[in-house]
Amino acid sequence: MKVLFVLTVLVVAWLTCGSAAAEPASVLIEAESFRDHGGWAIDQQSMDQMGSAYLLAHGLGTPVADATTTVEIPAPGAYRVWVRTWNWVSPWEASGAPGRFRVSLDGKLLDQTFGTSGDAWGWVGGEQVRLDKGTLRVTLHDLTGFDGRYDAIAFVPEAAPEPSNELDELAAFRRRCLGLPETPPLAGRFDLVVTGGGVAGICTAVTAARLGLSVALIQNRPVLGGNSSSEVGVSNSGLTNIAPFPQIGHLVRELGAEGDERRRRVVEAEDNIRLFLNRHVYAVETRDGRITSVTARSITDGSEFRFEGELFADCTGDATVGFLAGADWRMGREGRDETGESKAPPVADNVKMGSTLHWDSEDIGRDVPFPDCPWALRIDEDSCMETMRMTHSRNNWETGFRYDAATETERIRDYMLRAIFGNWDFLKNRSRLRGQFSHRRLSRVGYILGKRESRRLMGDVILTQHDVAQKRRYEDACLTSTWGIDLHTPHESNTEQFPGEEFISRGSGLPKKNVEIYPIPYRCLYSRNVENLFMAGRNISTTHVALGQVRVQNTTGMMGEVVGRAATICKRRSTTPRGVYAEHLDEFKELLARPVKGEPRAGNRQPTHLRENGPVQVAFDNS
């Protein structure tokens, strides 16, 4: 059986398109084709839903620098100008349009202001222009700094119809323009293809590479680290190097907490790894219950490549590869009536732990204004909690509890932006303590979501609260979690003020002193129905409740170290992930007990002598 997930095509250089009979041809300029992005950032988080990466004017209330490019017009004539964008606050019927921008052609502004209409991504405009043959300079002028977004401009001959917004037709239009082959070229064939460059993906790839496997590591952002990267900024929590296999965790420690460059240097030092940054996996091919290849599209130049492999590891967090491959998965909270877990709700629901954007401010020593934000959340003295301490966010700034973090990322992120900017607007302009904030300005607001939970892929063992609480011993216990069952739910006072649309959470179940450690079974780290698929990260096989125990960064990194070792056994013995457990468990344990080349970093020592079921001291940071 062949499963191919078809999405739209990114175009990353100027393109002309149209049939041979149509003169002049349409001209399409994708966001990624802009030679100079100025202050606009590339955002790929929602490309599976809206069809493309796009440019985001994330200026924290100050208009960003212009994005500019040039395009060749193939023939003179009359064209209509269509811009693919939308008013991003329209889902809440909010006042105003914060994401306004204009477009100029060879220095002349078009009449229309964009980002003011539309309740979803679509083509707007239609202004008629007359263009000469030759080079045309196109410029995007941000007007607000409040997250205007631009996907593409189409110059369409006056008599031709408006471009379609149906994703399949839009994809075909872009594919014709780009001249992409129906089958993308092969990037290579690998022993292991790892999708997702967070801590779990890095540790999977590096471990396997050091043990001799050829590895492709595919990451859809310009930096490695995922939630631990500079783009998101989550601290690395949880201990490493704990019994029963204290060698597991050395690579997590080697990566350290020094940031994006350190992680990239560790990966690029491995001859057996080919690193592919800025590439988003959007399609998976399977045959007879096995994945044969994944296809990734560049978010910066539009190229597409297939990656063939014997083994695949889904370290995406959202379980993207497993989902596309037809792996069994779940999302939301199981009911107590099904699992018997005391921390589960009585019956199943779609509530999940939420997602976070970090923000910070700085004192610049002089008065600095901040614009009124009528489109943002309306915050008052009661809903702006702990006003005196609101100079930066903490990990309890969290939203999206009732939304799908895999498919509704843009909506979740945008709601948090409304909360952050609404809060800052209140502090600066209307709070009784606004004088104390007069010299402060926003210095950072994230736009890449830090997600805690979305899809979970089902393995041969589904970890539950009972396993953790009763310290159930599995013979394939392979790495030890040290966090405790920490589940985030909407804060009660925030629910009263913003029912169903909370943005402040409460962490529950994590002691501030001692945490009981628990060894996770290996059978949680591979798919039960896609026979060559591993997973490492927050998408492993657990219930919602047990996810609270295993989701922190150091623990997910150790999952990667285990998966990298298991993949080596698969290659050596021509077996499957399940076969490692069923046929080669003793050999696997021997490999788990041995270090992989590469030394732990000095100055980051963790205890390696702890009893398997003994208490461990951990830092509490409500992550």
Image (spheres, rainbow, N blue to C red):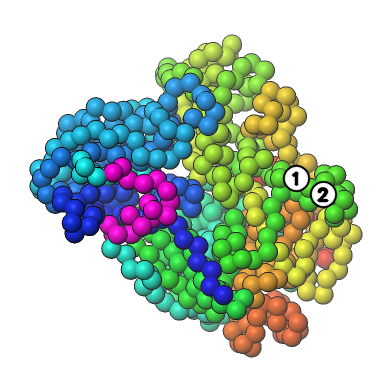
Q: Is residue 596 visible?
A: no
Q: Quadrant of residue 571?
A: bottom right
Indicate the quadrant containing the N terminus: top left, top right, bottom left or bottom right.
Answer: bottom right
Q: Is residue 402 visible?
A: yes
Q: Could you tell me which residue is drawn at 66 percent across and 26 percent down? A: 498
Q: Amino acid at mark 2?
A: Gly
Q: Could you tell me which residue is drawn at 42 percent across and 27 percent down? A: 98
Which residue, given by chain and number where applicable, does mark 2 sit on?
335
Which secondary structure, mark 2? loop
170 drawn magenta? yes
Which secondary structure, mark 1? loop
Residue 357 relative to residue 8: left or right: right
Start-end of magenta stretch: 161-178
Q: Quadrant of residue 495?
A: top right
- Provide residue 100's location: percent of width, then percent of height: 36, 29
Indicate the quadrant containing the C terminus: top left, top right, bottom left or bottom right.
Answer: top right
Q: Is residue 159 above or below residue 257?
A: above
Q: Is residue 249 above or below residue 405?
A: below
- Provide residue 265's location: percent of width, then percent of height: 45, 64
589 drawn magenta? no
Q: How would you rate the neighbour count of disc 1 (Cα within 10 Å): few for under 14, some for 14-19, many for 20 or more?
A: some
Residue 1 relative to residue 113: left or right: right
Q: Nearer the viewer, residue 203 or 534?
A: 534
- Provide residue 186's location: percent of width, then percent of height: 39, 75
- Provide residue 21's location: percent of width, then percent of height: 18, 56
Which residue, given by chain and number where applicable, does mark 1 sit on?
349
Q: What mark, if any, has residue 541 been given in the picture? A: none
**Mark 2 → mark 1, Cα distance in angstroms:** 7 Å
Q: Closer to the N terminus: mark 2 or mark 1?
A: 2
Q: Is residue 225 above or below residue 185?
A: above
* Cβ atoms at labels 2 and 1 below 8 Å apart: yes
